[in-house]
Image (tube, rainbow, N blue to C red):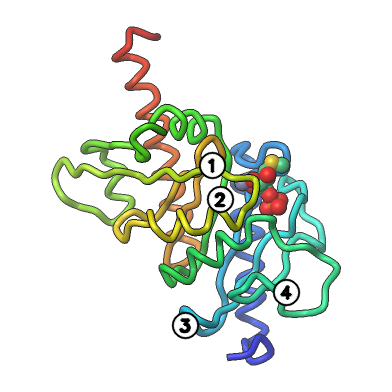
């Protein structure tokens, strides 16, 4: 399917979802210093060919402007002539879509996701036991244990991609970049948001529990 064949209403729907979720996350302080990026996929999907709307690079994500988003293809190339640059991390979105067939991907930097990614870096994953919000990932087992993968954070984004390829786990809809942030995804914007919120709850829970165990306040 070419970009022109995708219905205008579907493209508008993706932009409207991005706008809503951007505003909500901004109200939570989840885009400090222009960090973070968001994308929603449109049209038909095969791992070899897909398109998505993504935030333009370097924008202040706490405000709305007419130049906040553009559409790119599976290689991260713009689908239409534009002066906008896609997110510097577009290739990470491309790889997650290619591997998972997700419908939306949200990336935020928070203090909790950064601290936790460094704290558990030696084991390359965050262990979580039986927290109710694990059910937010559609995992309903009693006292379920999960390990949330952590990958290296390189300034050269293409170097991060092979680690994502290697470490993505089918039952865990997210991956941490060391001292950088979380990528969370879902079948659509609603599910990606639920997953991101569950991750952020879990990171704060793990952080506070570790602190208490160590006699902190
Ligand atoms: C300015 S700090 C954040 C960036 O380095 C990057 O990690 C990020 O999340 C936002 O980059 P962007 O190119 O705006 O999508
Ligand atoms: Zn980032």
Q: Please give the residue where the numbered disc 4 appears in the rendered image.
A: 78
For label 3, the residue is: 46
What is the distance, in whole Å, between disc 2 and disc 4 at their CAs?
20 Å
For marks 3 and 2, give the CA distance. Answer: 23 Å
Residue matched to label 1:
181
Spot occupied by residue 138 in the image (x, y as percentages of width and height): 28, 56
Label 2 lies in ligand 2 vicinity (Cβ under 8 Å):
yes
Decide if ligand 2 comes within 8 Å of the CB at mark 1: yes
**Earlier along the polypeptide chain: callout 1 or callout 2?**
2
Circles 1 and 2 in contact, beta carbons < 8 Å? yes
Asked if labels 4 and 3 touch by Cβ distance under 8 angstroms, the answer is: no
Q: Write the residue at 60% across / 40% down.
A: 30
- Which residue is at 47% across, 67% downward? 188
Q: Earlier in the sequence, mark 3 or mark 2?
A: 3
> Sequence order check: which comes first, mark 3 or mark 4?
3
Question: Split into 4 quadrants, where in the image is the N terminus?
Answer: bottom right
As helix, strand or loop, the secondary structure at mark 1 comes to strand
């Amino acid at each position: 399917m070419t970009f022109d064949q995708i219905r205008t209403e579907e493209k508008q729907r993706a932009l409207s979802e991005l706008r809503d979720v951007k505003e909500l996350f901004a109200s939570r302080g989840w885009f400090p210093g222009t960090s973070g990026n968001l994308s929603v996929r449109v049209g038909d999907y095969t791992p070899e060919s897909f398109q998505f709307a993504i935030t333009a690079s370097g924008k202040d994500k706490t405000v709305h402007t007419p130049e906040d988003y553009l559409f790119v293809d599976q290689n991260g190339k713009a689908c239409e002539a534009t002066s906008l640059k896609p997110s510097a991390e577009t290739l990470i979105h491309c790889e997650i879509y290619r591997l998972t067939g997700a419908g939306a991907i949200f990336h935020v930097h928070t203090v909790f996701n950064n601290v936790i990614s460094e704290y558990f870096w030696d084991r390359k994953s965050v262990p979580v036991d039986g927290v109710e919000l694990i059910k937010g990932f559609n995992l309903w087992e009693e006292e379920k244990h999960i390990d949330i993968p952590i990958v290296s954070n390189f300034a050269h984004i293409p170097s991060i991609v092979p680690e994502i390829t290697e470490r993505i786990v089918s039952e865990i809809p997210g991956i941490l970049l060391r001292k950088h942030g979380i990528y969370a995804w879902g079948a659509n914007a609603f599910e990606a948001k639920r997953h991101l919120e569950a991750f952020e709850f879990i990171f704060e829970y793990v952080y506070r529990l570790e602190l208490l165990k160590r006699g902190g306040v």
